[in-house]
Amino acid sequence: MKAGVQMGHNGNGKSGTHHITRSAWSGKMGFILAGAASAVGLGNLWRFPTLAAKYGGGMFIFTYFVLAFTFGISLLLLETALGRHTKLSVIGAYSKLNSRWKFVGVLAAAVPFIITPYYCIIGGWVTKYLCSYVAEGADAVAAEGFFTSFITDPAFTYVFMIVFMLLCIGVVALGVKNGIEKANMIMMPLLLVMAIGVAIFVLMQPGAVEGAAYYLIPDFSKFSPELVINALGQMFYSLSLAMGIMVTYGSYLDKKESLTQSVASIAGFDLLVSFLSGLMIVPAAFMALGLAEGGTMSAGPSLMFVTLPMVFEGMGGAATVIGIVFFVLVLFAAATSAISLIEACTSIIQDGTGWSRGKSLGLCAAFVIVAGCFINAGYNVLIWIEPLGPGTQLLDFFDFLSNSVMMPIVALLTCIFVGWIIKPKAIIDEVRASSKFSLAGPWTAMVKYIAPVLVVVILGWNIATQFGLL
Ligand code: PFF
């Protein structure tokens, strides 16, 4: 994080640096795929299904859908338009419009610097699982203690993390058009096909229908403010909002491409993959854990790395194949998101220092590897550090700091900046430069009034629940 902040301060922040060799998408399709690739990630594949199962299945999906297509899409539009308007990544974008608000850009820029290292640690776990399915088969992966013995084994976790990082850094090194766009063009369609395939396969298993029914049929008695707050938090993370990425991506977009259509497609793709992940994971978890426990199934690592391998193992002859397909799918989702994070960090360094893209990526890579090793040490040599209480690790702390604290703060300041300081007209004009924008009125109300209130509620809730006040 520190590196990100310092870069912001040290960066000259003046226009001009970006004239050197600013990257660009080859067209709208490249932009939409990149936005979707950033959005679709581990958040869709394990967090969404867990939340959906916990908060009444269909009820959660419905709430999430409404929020994503009102609140989420409004902020997505705001960020991409801000980037395209200024043609700068996040720090430059804020300081160009009002130099006193540069600090918001610096805060936003710090978020991908915090997320990237730990996201790559999980990417390393996924890589390890894929290799183990290929080399050892489903039984070995489902064996008791497999996950714990892996993450507490210092050597292997570092190796897999670095392999995953180098893979993603390699794609970014090839450039926006030749690297990121091409990788997305291959991985995103395959990801969708695999998600549909695995979902169909899981649904055909005995006992899956009950889980699917729970997932699809709304239970209105489960509606609660807590559900809405969790859906909102998930939406931020899933759409990669409030962390500078969409500003950067917007800055690579040509003035003639429609922003409104693009952001609707990105949100739609993200929602579709979340929905499909639920369709594969919720019934699978029900089969493994039974109806009562399925609704409160464990979140995060244990669901994906312990429960699912057990479910796959129960599928007999197909177990290894389904395990491989599933972890290739997760690997693609994690890699495309990590690539977007690394690209955002690189672009921030490049705009802040005026360095070449290659040199900026070099610094970014060095930072990500060193910070990744540090956070990963939280599972082994630094396991005695329990930043958020007993049983928590460094990774949990950085996840909490970036997603639960910094993202809402950045979102709040962004809405105040656009709604009250530079005024919404600048963004509306930018959107209208390439498409009609008949919903400019409701959008303005969202940015000026509704979003700030919702974001303050999320922030308060996150902090209160973390520290046991609720
Ligand atoms: N949106 C990604 C997910 O749902 O997993 C996570 C993510 C990617 C967060 C990129 C932030 C980001 F910049």
Image (tube, grey):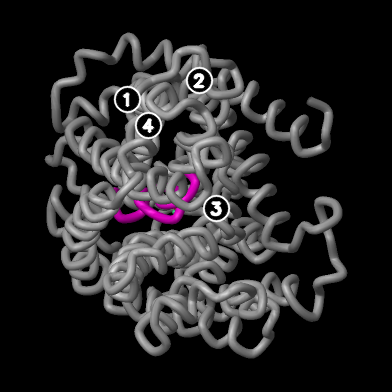
* The residue stretch that appears in magenta: 36-47
Identify the mark at residue 384; answer none if there is no mark. none
- Which of the two discs, 2 and 4, sits closer to the camera? 2
Q: Secondary structure at mark 4?
A: helix
Q: Can the viewer see residue 299 in this picture?
A: yes
**Looking at the picture, which amino acid does disc 2 mark?**
Ala
Q: Which residue is mark 2?
A: 451
> What is the three-letter code of the residue carrying label 3?
Ala
Residue position for label 4: 78
**Between marks 1 and 3, how big is the CA–CA gap?**
25 Å
**Could you say which is closer to the camera, residue 426 or residue 75?**
75
Q: In the figure, 262 relative to 173: above or below?
A: above
Q: Residue at x 81, y 75 (%)?
A: 382
- Expressed as whole percent of the image width and height from the top left, the position of residue 96 reads 46, 42
Q: Quadrant of the C terminus?
A: top right
Instruction: Tell me the kind of residue under disc 1.
Output: Phe
Q: Which residue is mark 1?
A: 69
